[in-house]
Image (cartoon, rainbow, N blue to C red):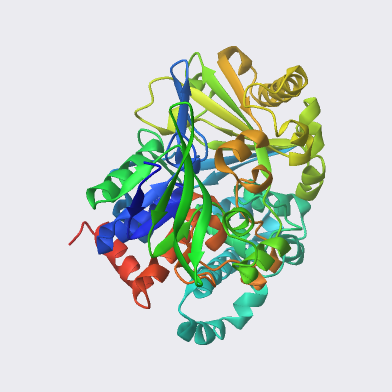
Amino acid sequence: MDAEQRDYDVIVVGSGMGGLAAGGLLARLEGRRVLVLESHFKLGGFTHTFQRKGFHWDVGVHYLGGLRDGSSLRGLFDLVTGGAVKWQQMPHVLEVFHYPDLTFEVPSDPGEYAAALAEQFPVEAPAIARYFDDVKRASAWYGREAYRWSAPLALRAGMGLAGLRDRRLALTTTKDYLERRFADPRLRAVVASQWGDYGLPPSQSAFAVHALVVGHYLRGGWYPVGTSRTIADGAREVIESRGGACLVDHTVEEILVEQGHAVGVRASYKKGRGPREATFRAPVVISDAGAHTTATRLLAPGTAPRLARSVASAEPSISTVTLYLGLSDSPESLGFTGANHWYFDSYDHDLTRARWAEVLVGKPPGAYLSFPSLKDPDARRHTAEVIAFVEYDAFAPWRDELWKRRGPEYELIKKQITLGLLDLVERHHPGFRDLVAFAELSTPLTVEGFTGHQRGGIYGLAATPQRIRDHLVPARTEVDGLFIAGADACSPGVAGAMMGGVFAAGAVMGVRGFPTIMGAARQEARGGS
């Protein structure tokens, strides 16, 4: 292979949700021959799964919103995967927020959610009603704005003049908005409890991103039957059935640019005793490797100065430790139903953010608990995941060491973190420890090693007001034929990464690209009629 040159219509760098979405849509709707190159030994990015001793876990898909029958998002998934993914709706109580003297259950209905908040905080009932209106406004504004970043130049100016009042709302920080709207600090904390889904505490996040995530889950959550591996499997079938290919263990070393136009990539792969190289060519290259990696590692210096300036001025997102647990019995024995649980030992989320270092010594100030096996009707063994945010720098001394060979000091830190996370869950749910039959902890170095993301970030570039205000990373780059997919081209999370892929595919298709894709998604959601 290293002596050959391979030609395709489109090359996609990375097989995360954005890359699979862009490649699948271009293959499905336009019949383009798409080559997907993935450095890991599995396709899927954060949608891939792994197993240990008969237990299976997803590494990044914990739940998705907006997938009710007939929705455009459901239609997009069906387009990308050829309808291969079946979705299981989660329980009506979707989330449970745990605070020192308050536990709040979130129902899968916006009216019930607002009513439950008003019952808990009756003095603030009018402000609560206004809050849900503002969530709708800011979320809608963000959706329009994210599309505008990647729209053809002729459409951008007119689109930017719309919604100036909503823009001011959307670009305030979540903390500023909540402090203006609510008097009770406990109420402010409760409605911000899902900040882990976008990775920034209230003082740092744009209210638009907070609203986008809250709105995404107002009508419930869904989980892919058979785990999230069905997403990559379905997209691969769509791409390969149109003459394309998906190659794992292929690391793109350089995006090739000739006379200002992207023309292909140079990749390395292993064969036999040593590394080999291959050059693949295409008139369109879509990078799902992250905007930072694309600008600083895959492009020659000076090739895309605007993109380089954008990523230089943006902050990377946070990283996590994840404790993967295999259970000896169903967690239903302790009253769990499949809802997600969020734990905080303070009502001040910014204080929680400042205390991340305590995770390393076994005293996490907060965590997220999820049960994949209770969400998936096809699960054969019971599993759980406990996630906490951490600082990357604490793990940086071991970044150049081999995976699973980082030494006893590193393993001791992992053991302390594991015990601390188990202690946290045990305090809230006595008897939980007795269910644990297997435990393995991943760190930011795991994320960095398998994804290449800057400092082990899980959400791309941080969703701050500045990033949104400055339109940092549109899907359409200054290099002709080069596009960015994934979360950096839209918003954090699996759905945000998919929409980044949609914007990239739409930009490749031209002026009518995005409307064509969304029209096809609506038709798909109606059953293809």
Which quarter of the picture shows residue 295?
bottom right
Q: Would you say 166 lies left or right of 108 here?
A: right
Residue drawn 74% across and 23% down? Answer: 410
* Residue 368, horizontal then vertical, whole percent: 62, 36
* Camera sees residue 108: no
Residue drawn 50% across and 24% down? Answer: 383
* Residue 339, horizontal then vertical, whole percent: 51, 36
Q: Identify which residue, 435 or 311, lies in the foreground.
A: 311
Q: Check the image and report above or below for 445 versus 383.
A: below
Which quarter of the picture shows residue 437?
top right
Which quarter of the picture shows residue 181?
bottom right
* Residue 23, horizontal then vertical, whole percent: 36, 55
Q: Check the image and report above or below for 195 versus 374.
A: below
* Residue 80, horizontal then vertical, whole percent: 33, 53
Q: Identify which residue, 399 or 354, lies in the foreground.
A: 399
Location of the C terminus by quadrant is bottom left
